[in-house]
Image (spheres, rainbow, N blue to C red):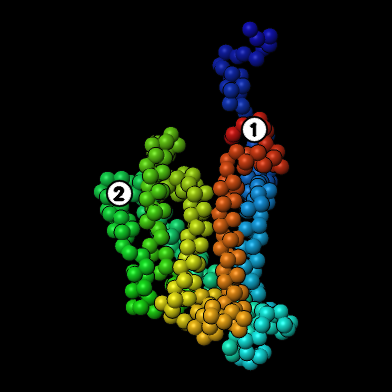
Amino acid sequence: MRDDDTDYRGDGGTAEERIFGTGEQRKATRTPIREKANRTFDVYVRSPLRIAWEDWRTRIGGLLLLFYILLGTFGVYFIPEPTLNEGPTYAGAFQSLDYPLGTDNLGRGIAEKIVHATPAMLKMALAGALTTTGAGTFFGFVSGYRGGITDRVLMTITDVQAVLPGLPLIVMLAAVFTPSNPFVVGVVLAIDTWPPLARSLRSQVLTLRESDFVEAGRSLGLSSWTIIRQDLIAKLAPYILVNAAGAATRVIKASVALYFLGILPFSILNWGVMMNRAYKTGNAISAPGHAGHWLFFPALALSGLLFSLVLFSQGLDRVFNPRLRARHAESAPDEDAAPQGEVR
């Protein structure tokens, strides 16, 4: 029973205003653009960075990875390229500030060579990660969402690629095409790494395509590509990013191993080439006191990069946890926010 009977009118105008509100009321309650931008920044930038910094794996892995990226981008401009006879041959480590990590058989500084080999390693890792995630995401999402003949054709291609012997195929391609560009080398090394990702993504898309939000998108007339891009990929983005970090790790290990064995052509300076020269030319393993530093420091740089990628990929799982993201999204005012501890 209402106390204010004057609020009712015969034409129902008052009732409409109470349910939907007038235009002035809607304008007054509309969220300001600045608040929207602040909330978006808080959800997608500030909260993930806060969660990443609180997790020691993401913090250490991210800082190490940032160090390598800075080394491969800006470091090459500040540290001069190694030159012949800049020091005595086979000088040991920590004997001179001019060549702090020692020299090789031609008197070139090991530290300078490691720095100038970093860009090639980063390029190969980036190309491998993009190839693996791109091919795996395309085959997995399209196959799982479309189904039918498309699913059978794409999964047949995936299965054929999965059963091919990866290492012999890479060796054959390297012998035929002799890739020298780091990006091409990364793509070649990622040829056999995307089928497992495509298979796992297809299984998850098969489950998600019957979800309510996908059915709602279909009922609204959205295209398949729009639903895949806006709903499914956004839903599985954390899993894809974690696999991208794993793919980069595998490509780096494969490239160094193949360069060390002499299977890939020595057209660019990288840590695998350095280790191969140290082993074959300097006899670093049989005479570690003579040229062991030539082999040890590139291996140490490789271990540090792999360690940073592994830690970073493990920490990403925590960053994309929806409960933690909701808990840390507190700086932007949100009147519609759920009570603390409740998943939004």
- Residue 277 visible at all: no
Callout 1 secondary element: loop
Q: CA distance from mark 2 to mark 1?
A: 40 Å
Residue hosting label 2? 151
Against 117, is 107 above or below?
below
Q: Position of residue 242 (x, y in %)?
A: 52, 53
Q: Which mark is residue 160?
A: none
Q: Residue at x 67, y 89 (%)?
A: 87
Foreground of the two, 49 or 295:
295
Furthest-bottom residue in view? Answer: 85
Q: Residue at x 40, y 58 (%)?
A: 194
Tell me if 39 is positioned left or right of 268 in this view. right
Q: Position of residue 322 (x, y in %)?
A: 58, 40
Corner quadrant of residue 289: bottom right
Q: Residue at x 41, y 43 (%)?
A: 204
Foreground of the two, 221 or 283:
283
Quadrant for the C terminus in the image = top right
- Residue 103 visible at all: yes
Foreground of the two, 218 or 99:
99
Question: Looking at the picture, which amino acid does disc 1 mark?
Answer: Gly
Residue hosting label 1? 341
Callout 2 secondary element: helix
